[in-house]
Image (tube, grey):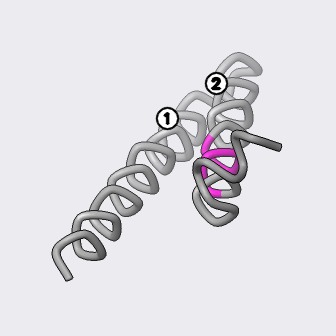
Amino acid sequence: MNLIKKLGLSNFLMLLLCVFIIVVAEVLFLTGDQMHGIFIGLWAPTLLGVMIYIKLIKNER
């Protein structure tokens, strides 16, 4: 609970979504669907980049 308060609910949910995406990408990659695994695996760093960008804009204001 302390982690959720420290990060904020929206950031915690986005990080949880990134972990879920990484797990799905690993499962796809290891079961033989490597191209889809790589494609979905690239979503997690993109979401993290968007989170950082939004935080930078918020801190500027």
Q: Is residue 10 left or right of residue 39?
A: right
Q: Position of residue 49 (x, y in %)?
A: 33, 53
Q: Position of residue 44 (x, y in %)?
A: 50, 45
Where does label 1 land, which residue? Answer: 38
Q: Is residue 15 magenta?
A: yes
Q: Which residues are magenta?
A: 14-18
**Foreground pick, 11 / 4:** 4
Crowd around label 2: few <14 · some 14–19 · many ≥20 (10 Å): some
**Foreground pick, 40 / 56:** 56
Residue at the far right: name it. 1
Quadrant including the C terminus: bottom left
Residue at the far top: name it. 30
Do tag 2 and tag 1 residues touch (Cβ < 8 Å)? yes
Q: Say what amino acid the circle numbered 1 marks.
A: Ile
What residue sits 64% from the left and 34% below the top?
Answer: 25
What residue sits 33% from the left and 64% below the top?
Answer: 55
Q: Is residue 40 left or right of residue 26?
A: left
Q: Is residue 24 above or below residue 48?
A: above
- Distance between mark 2 and mark 1 Cα atoms: 7 Å
Where does label 2 land, which residue? Answer: 29
Q: Position of residue 36 (x, y in %)?
A: 58, 42
- Residue 2 quadrant: top right
- Residue 29 quadrant: top right
Residue at the far left: name it. 60
Q: Is residue 19 left or right of residue 36?
A: right
